[in-house]
Image (cartoon, grey):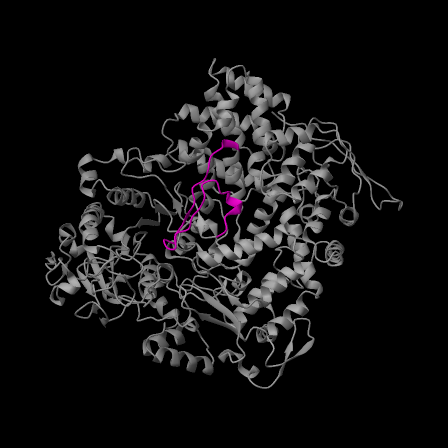
Amino acid sequence: MKLRLASWTAIITRHAGLLPLALAINVFSASPFESPAGMTSQNQIDDLVFARLQELKIAPAAVCSDAVFVRRVYLDVIGTVPTATECQQFILDPNKEKRRLLIDKLLARDEFADYFAMKWGDVLRIKAEFPINLWPNAAQSYHRWVHDAIRDNRPSDQFARDLLTASGSNFENPPVNFYRAMQNRTPSGIAQTVALTWLGERAEHWPSNDLANLSVFYANVGYKATAEWKEEIVYFNPAATNAGALNGAAVKGILPDGSTVKLAPEQDPRVIFANWLVKDPQFARNLANRAWAWLLGCGIVHDPDDFRTDNPPSNPKLLAFLAKEFTSSGYDFKRLCRLILNSKTYQLASVLPGHSPAAAVNFAFYPLRRLDAEVLIDAVDQITSTNEKYASAIPEPYTFIPDNLRSIALPDGSITSAFLELFGRPSRDTGLQSERNNHITAAQKLNLLNSSLMQKKIASSRMIDFQTSPGRTPADIVNGMYLGILSRFPTPEEQHAAQEYFKKYGTSRRLPSIDLAWALMNSTEFLYRH
Amino acid sequence: MSAFYFDIEKQRPRISRREAIRRAMLAASGLVLADHLSFKAYAAPRTARAKSVIQIWMWGGPSHLDIFDPKPDAGYDYCGPLKSPLETNVSGIRIGELLPLLAKQADKYSLIRSMTHGNNGHETASYIVQTGRQPGGRLVYPSVGAVVSLAKGYDAGYKGLIPPYVVLTEPQGRFDEAGFLGARYKPFATGGNPAISPFAVEGVVAPGITEEHQKNRRQLLHQLDTLGQTMPDDPQIAAATQAENMAYDMILGDGAKVFDLTQEKAELRDRYGKSKFGQSCLVARRLVERGIPYITINYGGWDTHKENFQAMRRMLPDMDKGLATLLQDLGERGLLDSTIVWWGGEFGRTPKVLWEAPWNGGRNHYGKVFSAMLAGGGFKGGQVVGTSDARGEEVKERPVYPVDLIGSIYTQLGIDPTTKLPNPDGQPMFVLPQPTDGIKSAGLLKEIMSA
């Protein structure tokens, strides 16, 4: 079956009106992915993105359909696929404000904190085992602390300050684990991690003086063990042997922006740095860019943790706008997400055949991305009503992992499964975003197409039992499975093709139903955000 | 030392005086890795002796005293009930009494009885032994298997259906084996159990689904993949299509046959032993025959803190059968010359037995001295490298550090030690550490490397 693509033209207003740009798009096809609605700028994000596209003479994709939107926004905000009922209600809801209302509803859900704690867990390297070696108790408490900060929408400046200035026991004061969750605990090693996390910069590429200057602020981080097994205290140690010139007399510290501050020997220089950091514009740019990259798959600066003068933002005004909004809101992270999610830019379709690389980095469409390992297995488990088995390589202390724990809520990067390893879950060794690998491989395809794991999950699922219960026709089954697995109704062509397949099996419903579920769960639509 | 400088002067035209002094100071300690270029003298001039590696990873840390370094004269507190080592078919070499079959193959392998790194933590020691590095930097280095996968796998023109780095049957999970090289270089874990027929390799062999059924449902998938069809030229979709085609080449093509052990004679399968380990050795041989460059058998259960001797009596007969038959079988098929078999774990175990409760005759972790075994692929048989002291507590002669063993394996594989490792920092990094990394070394295993 060949889908008729929307033939569309972009009509660009030449006169500055109320909107700097309005794109009218002619959509007449029955595409399940695009909406026939015209394109109007929703907020200033769209003004800036569309202006840039106009400059580059790139026509954007159409707005995505409601069915695509509901699946996309669930996946991006709560890392979870919507249920068949949730999809049906949304798709059939006539309320014109339904997208905005759904965004608000999802930002308030518990899974938002689970999912974003997973993302921050990558950045903050929450992992019990080698080489981070937080050990299970500390990994759990660190994760809980990060999770709760996200749930409570703690302002990001406070979040960063808490992590950067904490002292005390790794068990009693979870944010001290920021300083423990790194292999290299020398002053320059800590400085590199701080720069990567909070400035989105690779300090190892800075001029060596700059790295040395930042290291001065981390020359007095002390670590000591206690009588409690694997407990460690992080503290301000004015007499640190690696403090060098800091001992005794006050010296000056040079901040990354070049300004100098006086460092008194009795004062923890980490506090001075943190106070400077949260007011520095790069702090807001970094976090705004990370949020954008998490939601749209590509940073305005990309990689999102590689700000450099020779790696400029694709749309500087857009980045400046987001950073300004974020700062003036008092670093309200959910508000930032809400702003992005409500834009038409975010809501563009993923369908833009023959798109250029420039279209991709300027956000002319929503890019396809394979689901994260954790999100994918959670989706499979939700649909098939099964659980994944996880294990930690650490035998003692024994880590209790509840049976129904979702993968996005795993507290510790060392708790894993063969599936998660195969599908590129990050090892959380470095905090680099590029550790997460969502590129498809042949081994992954083998697993999805033909593993006993997938086969058993599908064959044993309650969905198959329900769909094949007496009285349901093949057409009902096809409708139900499309809604449950792909979050939409089938097109007439798809309904027809699926029913033809059922005919091969005579009156048997179960076998063709398993194959249909298998086919839908191996489709591009299932495996990729779109 | 002079040879070391000779190499540098010859191969690298200029080094600064300051650098030369710094290197001399490092090398003068005698225990720091010499310039990686000194390895080049062995690796570069000749073509590879070995084509494949079978790594038998003794996960947990096997007891050196009870296996390849018996100390019958140390007394009951050290050797417990295992006090009668066996003579082997090489005079002067004795091994543990639970290994009668390996005793008949000693001419095929060399024992290293002076492995050392001094670390007693599983995860850190696993990392040190399999990367040759020390932890502490920001990055995690790739294991030997991932490096071989880089140097001999798809990037080097490998075209096999089976991925170039296979682990039987589960990944180690202690550290990320691919390190900063990333997911492309991770091992393909077979899953399943080769001792159960059919060996259901995850994704490759799906019992109960006929070939016709496979084809039918693939057709259905294509009919219903509406999004995929709207943009076949999208890079993401093109990559997925390529991966799917490769997957079906395995499922419907010859890939699955490699894992079909029913193609082997029953008598040979019995000789390998019906254990999971024994049958894994047989699968490894079949993979070697098809040119897979690196196979790890992840063999767990050696962390014998408690009741060590009962564990030895239970597990060593399986190991003996599988490993001895593997060496013999590779030899008979003319594959041993081109296949390195590397046996070893992350450390040894405390020579002095802990008789008290709760250990009840147990042995703890011991990184100060332990054993490894190398066979084939240009490594001589019937040799012993290094010795431990009378109680197996210290290295007595010729320490061998992990990097020495790894460097020797790379040499036999013809992997240039100056091969660069792509890394996220964009820094120059090589398959072997640089002198500046301060890694301890006592030189390549020249004494067992055929000329």
Magenta-drawn stretch, dominant element (helix, strand or loop): loop
* Residue numbers of the magenta segment: A383-412
Q: Is residue B51 left or right of residue A417?
A: left
- Count of numbered marks: 0
Quarter of the picture containing the C terminus of chain B is bottom left
Residue A522 location (% of width, % of height): 52, 33
Nearest the viewer among A283 and B277 is A283
Image coordinates of residue B302 in percent, x first then y, are 27, 54
Q: Tell me if A12 is positioned left or right of B33 in this view.
A: right
Q: Quadrant of the N terminus of chain B?
A: bottom left
> Within the magenta stretch, is there residue B251?
no
Q: Residue A494's image quarter?
A: top right
> Splitting the image into 4 quarters, where does residue A530 fall?
top right
Foreground of the two, A101 or A375: A101
Q: Is residue A392 magenta?
A: yes
Where's residue B97, x and y in %?
Answer: 13, 55
Whether residue B311 is situated above or below residue A385 in the rendered picture: below
Seen at 42% across and 31% down, the residue is A456
Q: Could you tell me which residue is drawn at 39 percent across and 57 percent down?
A: B143
Judge whether residue A126 can be spotted in this image. Answer: no
Q: Judge from the rendering whether residue B131 lies leftward or rightward of residue A113; answer left or right.
A: left
Work out whether A84 lies above or below A110: above
Answer yes or no: is residue A85 visible.
yes
